[in-house]
Image (tube, rainbow, N blue to C red):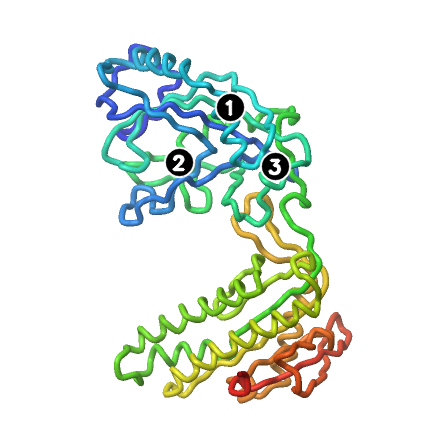
Amino acid sequence: MPQTNSFLDLTNESDDFEFPHPPSAVWLIFSLEFPAIYQGEKYILATQPYYGDASKTVNFGEGIWYPPFSAFPVDLRFFPTRNLGEMREKLEQTEREKFHEEFIDEIAYNLGLGEPRYERVRERPIDEYKLSPRGHNVYKFFRLVRYRCWHSGKDGLRNLADPETAKGLAYIPLNLPKVSIQSKKLGPHRFRFYSRVVATHFEHLVGTYRGERTIDKYTQFSDADIVNAEEGFLLFFDVSGFGKTEAATRTASFHPTETSSDIAQSFRTVLSQYFLAFFQELEISHYVTLGDGFIAGVPYRSIKSKPDFFRCLSSALGNLSKALREMNNRIENSGESVGLRASVLEGEYRYGRIAGLSSLRAEFDGTLLIDAARLDAGTKEHLSPIQRSRHLIVSSYSEKCLDIPILNGCDIKDFEVDVKEKKATSFMKIIDFDAIE
């Protein structure tokens, strides 16, 4: 049994164990465990119910991973706890008063499962005596009543897979190694996943599921469950001259009321806000920002028609270009300015947990990303620094993708790009920010 000043696992302790300090609170927790399999590896579903206090080093401000649960306080009035046996009797009495299945159904329903399959874990409940995960200054007692849940059909499986990570569901590998954490509050050894501490009872979960040979009660995921295969448009945007302009705003003193540091920070923040406004205007939910640029996906299923999409894209491009023009006007005394390169590609792409089930972020994948990188490199080769400044440059491998109202009247230029040791014809239109109404 691990023994520290902050944490005691009392699951297998005898009833006559006496608490070092009377617990200030007792919680009965119904824990819902979703073991899963992906590409032969085993995982457990986890969520982060709350962030830690960033001002303290106890949990590094990152929060703690837990399996989904419902928690109920146990009434300690008129019940002076003396030892573990009395505590267990009180908890068993409280547990009998609760309707377990209703709470388990509610948790599963909130995860998106209509009729989940579950059973109580045969092992005895987990008893923990430890410092409060949030308060860190009071001792509490926790009993975890464990339920195992799995999903055997296809309906609703994406609700568990969370391919776009919009629900914040995480899958922790059961082969996660222990790490040493030098903290009296946390204890000497704990599990961590992407810098966040994993719940103290994780070792019990590993013991239950890691060595199991039968997998009929595991939720089984494939690539198709965790990644969306899409067909539509990919937009690649990059702000030209961002690095030089941002550096100039940090080092130059050219504004009568704002410091250069304030302007530099505002410059970066405002640029992110411009991108967000662009996404909202086009109702884009698939995107990845990359500092001074972004990649955004627009599936065919999300647009009325291609002409309608290009009209909407034209309006959004115009608003973004005008916003960048205003930014240039604000920093004109720095001697630098920015432009906007945009590539519009059409075809198939993938969006989701590209790196696997344990990934916490949705990303893009597909040959269109490689095509876009080559197209962008070719575009820069055919533009002068002056053309890249204070201009909107839109390029594509298809002339039809440049049929955007805001670019009407602009001359189209064709150029060649190396694609897999071959030459591909590409097209480009350029318009000055000042010409955009």
Query: Where is residue 276 drawn, in percent x and y?
Result: 49, 64
Q: Are marks 1 and 2 in contact (CB under 8 Å)?
A: no
Residue 147 got which mark?
1
Percent position of residue 31, x then y = 46, 27
The x and y percentages for residue 64 are 40, 39
The secondary structure type at the circle numbered 3 is strand
Q: Nearer the viewer, residue 312 or 262?
A: 312
The crowd level at tag 3 (other Cα within 10 Å; few <14, some 14-19, many 20+) is: few
When the figure is inspected, residue 201 is found, relative to residue 405, above or below; the finding is above
Against 290, residue 422 (above or below) is below
In front: label 1 or label 2:
1
Say what amino acid the circle numbered 1 marks.
Tyr
In the drawing, does residue 1 fall left or right of residue 79?
A: right
Q: Secondary structure at mark 1?
A: strand
For the residue pair 116 and 56, the one nearer the viewer reads as 116
Q: Secondary structure at mark 2?
A: strand
Q: Which is more foreground, mark 1 or mark 3?
A: 1
User: Is residue 413 rendered to the left or right of residue 160?
Assistant: right
Quarter of image, res 349: bottom right
